[in-house]
Amino acid sequence: MFRRSLQFAVLILCIAAACFTEIPRFLDRDFNKLVKKPPYSASEKAFDLHKQLTIIDLHADSLLWGRDLLERSQDGHVDIPRLADGNVTLQVFSLPTKTPRGLNIESNDDKTDSIYWLAIVDRWPPRTWNSLTERTLYQARRLHDFARGSEGGFTVIETSADLFSYLQRRQRNNRLTAGLLSIEGAHALDGKLENLDVLYRAGYRMMSPSHFFDNDIGGSSAGVHKTGLTEKGRDWVRQMEAHHMIIDLAHASPQTIEDVLAIATRPVVVSHTGVKGTCNNNRNLTDDQIQAIASKGGLIGIAYWDIATCGTDARAIVKAMRYVSDRVGVEHVALGSDFDGAVTEPFDTTGLVQITDAMLQAGYTDSDIRLIMGENALKFFQSNLPEK
C-alpha cells in the first residue's frame, strides 16, 4: 500500500513538473508565432544601410513568457542575442499585468485574469499572484538580472544620462543592446497612485492609462464602456509628468486620448498601433488622433501584426508608416512591433532589415529611414527621460 502511494505521489510530482516546465513554452510557441522563420532575405542595399541604423522599437511583451532572454530561443520574437543580430539599439520591454479571458479588440471587462494562471505555471513568486504591482516589480527585477548576467552586453536605461553613456559604449561595439521598462495599463498600480513612486524606483519609465479593459484611471479602446479619464486619472497624468515618465496612449479609448492630450504638458507616445486609414478597426488611430498626437510633439509606433496593418509583411507596415508620415511628417513615426504580444508577426527581431528594404522600395530616403527606424525615438527619449 505504501509503495503504491509512493508511486502515485511520484507520478503526481512528475506531472506537476511537466506542467511547470512545458506549459509556459507551449503557450509561448502557441501565442507568439511567425509568418516566416529566420533567416530573412533583403536587398544588398538594405543590408548595408541597416547596419548603419540606430534602431529603437517602442513595444515588446517578451518579459511575460518566462524565457531566459540571455539565451537565444527558437520560440517567440525577441531575446538579447537576437536583438544584437538585428542591430537593435534599444528595445522597450512592456509588461501586461492583467488580461481578460476571451481577449478581443471590441469589448472586455476586468472580471477575469489570464495572467494569474500564467504566473502560477511559470512559477512567479506567490506575492505576484494577486498583486499587479508585485507582478511589475518581479519582472523589473528579471530585466535587471539579465543586464547583470550579460557581462555588459545588455543595459537597462532609466535616465538620459544612462542613454548617453550607453550610446558612447555602443559606438565601440555595435553588438551591445539595451532595454527600457514600460507598463501596459495603470491598473498595475493596484488602485494606489502612491505605487507610481514604487514602480518608478523599480525602473519603469513608460505607462499607458489602460490596456484591454476600462479601469479607475481611464477607458480602453477595447473596454465595455470606453470611458475617458477619471479624476484619479487626471492626477495620474500630473504625477506621470512630474516623474518625467512617458504616457503611452496605446489601447486608450478615444475619449481617454482626447482627455490626456487636453491636459498633458509633455509629449506622449502611442507605442504600438495601426491607423484606420490603412486598416479600419476599433484598435487603430483616426486621422484626427494622429494629428492631435503629432501636434503635442508625440510619437506613433507602427505595429506589425495583421490587426494593426491588415497585412502580414513589411510592405503592410510601411504602408501604415507612409500614411502617417504623409499627414504629419516622418519625425512622428517610429517602430512599435508588439513582439511577443500574443500575436503572429511577419518576422522576429532579426528580420527588421525587411522593413528597411520595404521602405527603400516605397521611396523613402536614407535620411527618412534613419529617423523612422530609431532616430526619432532616440531624440524623444533623450528629451523626455529624467536626466539622472
Image (spheres, rainbow, N blue to C red):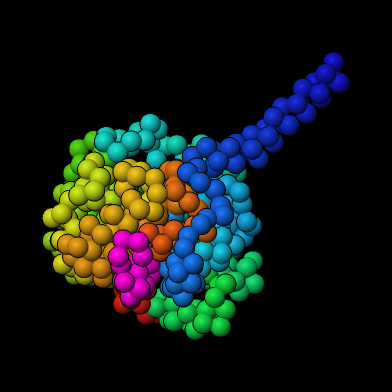
The overriding secondary structure of the stretch rendered in magenta is helix
Camera-side residue: 34 or 219? 34
The x and y percentages for residue 69 are: 58, 57
Does residue 365 belong to the magenta stretch? yes
Task: Using residue 330 as the reference point, say whether residue 204 is left or right of it.
Answer: right
Camera-side residue: 118 or 287? 287
Residue at screen point 59% across, 62% down: 81
Quadrant (top left, top right, bottom left, bottom right) of the C terminus: bottom left
Camera-side residue: 156 or 172? 172
Q: Which quarter of the figure has residue 356? A: bottom left
**Which residue appears farthest toward the top when viewing the image?**
1
Does residue 361 belong to the magenta stretch? yes
Number of numbered discs present? 0
Task: Using residue 200 as the reference point, say whether residue 321 is left or right of it.
Answer: left
Q: Is residue 379 above or below residue 120?
A: below
The x and y percentages for residue 23 are: 60, 36
Q: Is residue 34 above or below residue 104?
A: below
Residue at screen point 30% across, 67% down: 364
Quadrant (top left, top right, bottom left, bottom right) of the N terminus: top right
Specify whether residue 238 is in view: no
The x and y percentages for residue 267 are: 24, 68
The x and y percentages for residue 87 are: 51, 68
Specify whether residue 326 is in view: yes
Q: Is residue 21 above or below residue 245?
A: above
Query: What residue span does the magenta drawing correspond to?
Result: 360-375
Task: Using residue 229 as the reference point, say whether residue 50 is left or right of it.
Answer: right
Residue at screen point 38% across, 51% down: 304
Residue at screen point 44% across, 43% down: 344
